[in-house]
Image: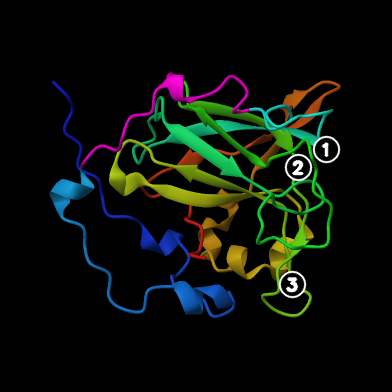
Amino acid sequence: MSETVTLRPRDWDSHPPYLHPDYKSTVLRGPTKPLLPMKDQLRQLRAPVYGHDAIGALDHDLTRNAAKNGAPLGERIVVTGRVLDERGRPVRNTLIEIWQANAAGRYVHKVDQHDAPLDPNFLGAGRTLTDSEGRYKFYTIKPGAYPWGNHPNAWRPNHIHFSLFGEYFASRLVTQMYFPGDPLLAFDPIFQGTPERARDRLISKFSLDVTEPDFALGYVFDIVLRGPNETPMETPR
């Protein structure tokens, strides 16, 4: 018999507001009318299950999954961690998708017209499933900073976008992972829009244990889908 789980309300004090004037896009895109509460029976529904057959052998390795005539340029990194539910238990076999800019700070997207080079061997997207302990691992290139026009001389810190479904529709999460010691964090309205007490949950931790000798520096980024320590959501774009 499957276990009955009642999800607690989200800790909204851990998440950025829908409307954050310093981040100009939220004024245009954020909801302006009261939100409609989800019915309890819908909130408790389990999310779709994604099997291993949907994941390619190199989907988790952004240093190889788009290589055409060589390795992508930039600093290789390992990003790993655990996905946990609101009670601190591992979320097993759940899909994680990431996307990011390349080492020069440019996305593979027609809307991105930043005057920085594209890398023909780097797509900037990957996906994987957590294991039986809720662990995941990506190999990638450390993304570069880029200008984004939100305010004069505005630059986004180095970051990687994460998308997770978790076990329930109500545990859906889209967030961003930042890097320790980035001086741009103090000037970024997206990061600063997250309540101060929860900002550290968005910053990965450098780990020499995760670092792979002669190959890539390692970073740990644990993700909590709900509960008192939940990872903050990405401010709506």
Q: Secondary structure at mark 3?
A: loop
Q: In the image, which disc is placed on residue 223?
A: none
**Mark positioned earlier in the residue sequence (3 or 2):** 2
Mark 2 touching mark 1, by CB under 8 A?
Answer: yes
Local secondary structure at mark 2 = loop
Q: Which mark is residue 142?
A: 2
Residue located 84% across and 40% down the image: 74
On whether residue 56 falls in the magenta region, the answer is yes
Please say which color scheme the image uses: rainbow
Image vertical order of residue 63 relative to residue 205, above or below = above
Q: Earlier in the sequence, mark 3 or mark 1?
A: 1
Q: Is residue 7 magenta?
A: no
Q: Is residue 118 left or right of residue 186?
A: right
Instruction: Return the mark for residue 75.
Output: 1
Q: Nearer the viewer, residue 146 or 190?
A: 146
Residue at image location 52% in from the left, 39% down from the top = 97
Q: Which residues are magenta?
A: 45-60
Q: Quadrant of residue 17?
A: bottom left
Name the residue beneath numbered marker 3.
154
Measure the alpha-carbon separation of dots 2 and 1.
Answer: 6 Å
Q: Label 3: few (<14), some or many (≥20) within 10 Å?
A: some
Q: Amino acid at mark 1?
A: Glu
Instruction: Mark yes or no: residue 185 visible.
Output: yes
Quadrant of the drawing holding the N terminus: top left
In the picture shown, does residue 186 fall above or below 157? below
In x, y percent, where is residue 139? 69, 30
